[in-house]
Image (tube, rainbow, N blue to C red):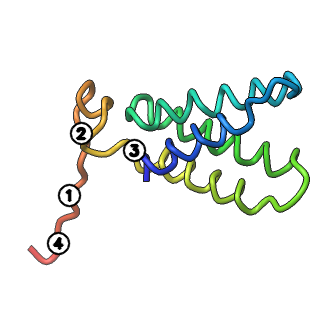
């Protein structure tokens, strides 16, 4: 999920970088690409996921047209912020991978 979100953010940011674009659009595209790179690497995943959620909500409010793609991206970002980076990430190498084992109450 982290890889798909990161790749789609990078592609979305590259598509919005045009010479005649407004400054706000360029800044949002650069932030989206930076957050996509962080998600690809699995670095600062809770922060990057929160930024993806904020970007998705901002785009769904500020952009005309159908907001559901942006709402979907915001949902993916929020879930990544809550779930964490996973075992194959820079965060797990730096801070260790946290795993929660749910035990059966019968024993």
- Marks 3/4 in contact by CB < 8 Å: the verdict is no
C-alpha span from label 3 to label 4? 24 Å
Which of the labelled discs sits on residue 104, or is there none? 4
C-alpha span from label 1 to label 3? 15 Å
Earlier residue among tags 1 and 3: 3
Which residue is label 1 attached to? Answer: 101
Earlier residue among tags 2 and 4: 2
Closer to the camera: disc 1 or disc 4? 1
Task: Find the residue positioned furthest to the bottom.
Answer: 106
Q: On the image, which quarter does residue 22 sit in?
A: top right
Which residue is label 2 attached to? Answer: 97
Which of the labelled discs sits on residue 84, or is there none? 3
- Tag 3, which secondary structure? loop
Q: Residues within 10 Å of mark 2 (few under 14, many from 20)?
A: some
C-alpha span from label 1 to label 2? 13 Å
- Marks 1/3 in contact by CB < 8 Å: the verdict is no
At a point 48% along the width and 31% down the height, the residue shown is: 37
- Tag 2, which secondary structure? loop
- Tag 4, which secondary structure? loop
Residue 20 % position (x, y): 88, 26
């Amino acid at each position: 999920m982290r890889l798909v979100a990161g790749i789609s953010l990078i592609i979305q940011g590259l598509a919005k970088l045009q010479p005649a674009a407004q400054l706000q659009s360029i800044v949002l595209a650069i932030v989206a690409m930076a957050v996509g790179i962080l998600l690809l690497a699995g670095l600062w995943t809770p922060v990057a996921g929160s930024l993806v959620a904020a970007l998705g909500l901002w785009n769904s409010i500020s952009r005309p047209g159908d907001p559901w793609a942006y709402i979907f991206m915001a949902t993916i970002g929020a879930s990544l912020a809550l779930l964490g980076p996973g075992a194959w990430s820079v965060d797990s190498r730096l801070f260790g991978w946290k795993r929660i084992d749910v035990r059966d109450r019968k024993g």
